[in-house]
Image (spheres, coloured by chain):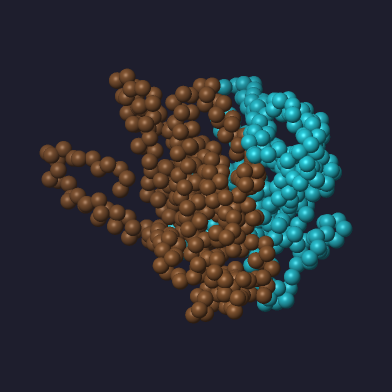
Chain colours: A cyan, B brown
Amino acid sequence: MDASTKEGNVVGYALRRFLLFFPTITLVSIIVFTLLQLAPGDAATIIGQDASPAKVAALRESLHLNDPIPVQYARWVSQLLRGDLGKSLFSGRPVITDVLYRLPTTFELGAMSMIMTAVIGSTIGMISAARPEGLADQVLRTFAVLGLSLPVFWIGAIVLVVPALKLGYSPPAYYEGLFTDPYTNIRILLPAAFVLALSGIGRISRLMRATMLDVMSQDYMRTARAKGLKETTVIFRHGLRNGLIPVVTLLGLEVPFLFGGAVIIEQIFHIPGMGNYLYDAINKRDIYVAMDMNMFIATIVLLSSLTVDLTYGLIDPRMRTRG
Amino acid sequence: MMQQSVAEPAAVSFTMPQRRTRAQRILRILARKRLMTVSFVILIIIGGASFLAPVISSYSYVATDTAHTLSIPSSLHWFGSDVVGADTFARTLYGGQVAFIVGGFSSFISLGLALTMGLTSVQLGGKFDLLLQRIVDAWLSLPYLVVVLTAVAMFGPGLWTVVLILGVSRAFGLSRVIRGSAIREQGMVYIEAAESIGATKLRIAVRHVLPNLLPVVIVLATLVFAQAILAEASLSFLGWGVPPPKPSWGSMLSGQVIQYMYQQPWLGVFPGIALTATVWAANLAGDGLRDILDPRLRGQNV
């Protein structure tokens, strides 16, 4: 295989992977739309709970709910494509305004949590892999499973209640943005991000252990040792570099878990983020906001997995052919 | 334990060491896999105690004892009592019933659907496989808790709604794992043999591939059981799970309860421990089973 075809494979892989994004996101929109159509009652009956039948009928007309379902779907999608996420049924505010206001908060929370997951998770995985089946390995592995078994809301409650009772310390009651009041911001988000990271730490450390054990048995590791390199050089320069590649992929897969966890953790720590917005919408049965939020979150998840796959394809040539 | 033992030809059988009975082999595995054994024992104890709740506890989960509200564990209320004076021990036991029912039934639904999807995808292949896999991609881009919460909120909370929604939502991701294993089986010689004698696709899927997927299915069932219990507790915590008065470990730790935990921290101790212990034990049991039944899945997060 000469250089030009190899080059072509990379581009071909990237293009195929990129094109896959469109049918998938279309299917997501159909799933989300169907899910919210299946629900008993429609938007008009939800806002007009105590209204007269005539008023509900008028509402239904003004929300275009009498149109055929495919027409309603087409209208929703064309709005989404124009970047118009519609309005909340209750506040009447455009959804996009609220989303853009809340996105930075959840992004900061997610980023902090992701860094903790990556650093703590891969460190634990490395220690585990250093002496497989040793005491440290067995203990750490059992705790990694604990990490993915802990209910986020229980640990969140413990993190709030125990310091308050034992040390008289409570995090600030009101959330402040990173740029308006960094100290308050960090004191709320740091513990929240840590609780959110626990399950990811469990998953990443397990994967890190498995890949490091795999890397350790490779020929290039033996060669590195045979050349007389120091053990630390062997592990960090040769082992870790290769062992981290799959971990990067798994970090991309952590994004959906972060959104799921954010719904809970933002509730406990009173953080006005996207999870909190979705939860409010769901509690009010504001189905348009719920639809748009599901769509928005799915788009972010798909874009991050696309990014990971594309970078991965460029870093690791073995992946290109698998498509 | 899961594989049928192969009968040796009579001519060589005398050179073989004496065969252990099935019970002996299971005991040996349990003795070697101590963590897994302990996990199963914990699951049996918590599950058994939950379903024997009316026998074990003299309290009902709704009875209120207004003389003893927010009390610490005592001989009267073993796990203490909540803000209306309901017995936390009884509520924790009845909450366990909800957890085990949701975990059991929803993982059963998940695996049934996942097997159907995975096997049809592999057997029909081609365009059908391509389309189904894109639908799975699409579904997986919706975070589990987000889509489950949205669905429950649309259909209204309730024990069986939660079971159904958790079961169906989780099936898509699992069908991927099943599909992967089924593709591996598809390359085996025995499939070729079955095809050569004219077995239909349905027959190959049900009679040949399915039994060989049993180890994978058992491992997945244990892990999905744990995930479903955690998901139900999360939904109940958010107020969209199993509606009151039926207690759930999630709702016993929910928003308003956290406020009372500042007054009486014992409120949060036992439901949290019960939930964590159950999920942890099921996960460890699943890991142990995976090591024994399907080492190829090791290190994978499903």
- Total count of labels: 0
Quadrant of the image occupied by residue B172: top right
Q: Residue at x 54, y 57 (%)?
A: A149
Image check: A19 left or right of B97? right
Image check: A52 left or right of B27? right
Q: Residue at x 49, y 51 (%)?
A: B103
Q: Residue at x 21, y 52 (%)?
A: B20
**Residue B220 visible, this angle:** no
Residue B273 location in percent, x, y? 53, 66
Which residue is situated farthest in the right direction here?
A180
Quadrant of the image occupied by residue A10: top right
In the foreground, A293 or A6: A293
In the image, residue B205 sits, relative to residue B269, either above or below, namely: above
In the image, residue B192 sits, relative to residue B185, either above or below, namely: above
Residue A55 location in percent, x, y? 80, 38
Residue A57 location in percent, x, y? 77, 34
Q: Residue at x 77, y 28 (%)?
A: A75
Image check: A35 left or right of B172? right
Residue A303 location in percent, x, y? 70, 37
**Residue A30 visible, this angle:** yes
In the foreground, A313 or B212: B212
